[in-house]
């Protein structure tokens, strides 16, 4: 079993792998280590977490017990917002996460570069709705998209989305519907396969991830863009996800 400390697109709501694993069994050179299915422990050493992220260097995980959630896809609430700047989107997301009215499961921001790519690839660039957004001040090269999806019991999902919409409005964001996030979810795995055809054309693509605090997020974003724009034939965009305790920025350079 892979023992990497993975995080998925819904990690804002469900957490990372270490938040999901309750117990495990691992075979090591010193013998078999097996933990019990206790929901919490007060002991000094949290042994099984040593194996999460060890990539097999401490032992091979042969069994694992996960905490599970009742999945109710019919209740999922979606929302997409557009902001006039990346800075406004980040500040609104921070307010949403720290509000304590509940967290979305999927929660992401595309910076202006990725937002422009999304408009072009979806065929929305220079459409009637795009021209209306421009008239309202949501300009290419500056605007940022925010995607949110909340899973769970219907009253909860509708409540959280309504609160998020209110917070976005206060942060000068505009609600633009549900379909963009549904389309993104439908193609989120297939889009990764464009890497190999691009490499066949001589275009190298890669993704880098890091975790920063809210205080340093914009500093990292500005620094990466400054670095990239000094170099020819290099392009980057940011995808910003939130975790319960940390934030992730994915930087794709090609």
Image (cartoon, helix red, strand yellow):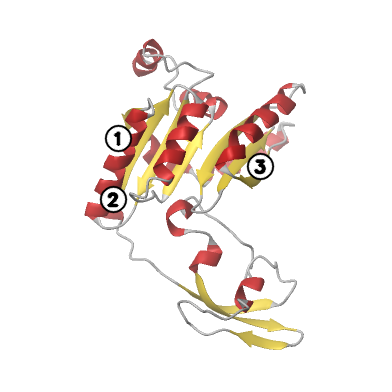
Q: Among all residues in the image, which is located at the extreme bottom?
A: 31
**Secondary structure state at the residue bearing disc 1:** helix
Q: Looking at the rendered structure, which numbered label has been put on residue 166?
A: 1
Q: What percent of the width, then of the height, locates residue 111? A: 54, 30
Q: What percent of the width, then of the height, locates residue 56? A: 71, 71
Which residue in the structure is indicated by mark 2? 157
Which residue in the structure is indicated by mark 3? 207
Q: Among all residues in the image, which is located at the extreme top?
A: 135
Q: Looking at the rendered structure, which numbered label has been put on residue 154?
A: none
3 vs 2, front mark: 2
**Sooner in the amino-acid sequence: mark 3 or mark 1:** 1
Vertical position of residue 88 compared to residue 101: above or below: above
Cα–Cα span, label 3 and label 1: 33 Å
**Sooner in the amino-acid sequence: mark 2 or mark 1:** 2
Cα–Cα span, label 2 and label 1: 14 Å
Residue 178 shows in the view? no
Q: Residue at x 55, y 56 (%)?
A: 7
Vertical position of residue 10 compared to residue 194: above or below: below
Q: Residue at x 46, y 24 (%)?
A: 119
- The answer to the question of whether label 3 and label 1 lie on touching residues, with beta carbons closer than 8 A, is no
**Secondary structure state at the residue bearing disc 3:** strand
Q: Is residue 210 left or right of residue 176?
A: right
């Amino acid at each position: 079993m892979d023992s990497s400390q993975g995080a998925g697109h819904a990690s804002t709501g469900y957490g990372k792998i270490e938040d999901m694993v309750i117990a495990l069994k691992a075979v090591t050179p010193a013998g078999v280590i097996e933990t019990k299915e206790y929901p919490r422990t007060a002991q000094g050493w949290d042994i099984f977490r040593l194996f999460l992220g060890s990539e097999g260097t401490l032992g091979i995980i042969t069994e694992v017990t996960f905490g599970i959630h009742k999945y109710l896809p019919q209740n999922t609430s979606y929302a997409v917002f557009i902001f006039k700047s990346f800075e406004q989107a980040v500040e609104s997301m921070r307010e949403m996460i720290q509000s304590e009215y509940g967290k979305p499961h999927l929660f992401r921001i595309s910076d202006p570069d990725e937002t422009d790519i999304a408009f072009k690839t979806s065929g929305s660039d220079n459409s009637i709705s795009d021209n209306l957004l421009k008239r309202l001040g949501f300009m290419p090269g500056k605007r940022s998209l925010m995607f949110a999806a909340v899973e769970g019991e219907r009253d909860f999902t509708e409540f959280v989305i309504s609160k998020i919409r209110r917070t976005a409005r206060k942060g000068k964001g505009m609600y633009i519907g549900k379909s963009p996030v549904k389309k993104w979810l439908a193609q989120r795995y297939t889009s990764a396969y464009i890497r190999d055809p691009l490499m066949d054309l001589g275009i190298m693509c890669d993704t880098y991830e890091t975790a920063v605090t809210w205080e340093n997020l914009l500093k990292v974003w500005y620094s990466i863009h400054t670095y990239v724009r000094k170099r020819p034939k290099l392009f980057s965009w940011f995808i910003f996800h939130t975790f319960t305790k940390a934030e992730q920025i994915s930087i794709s350079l090609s």
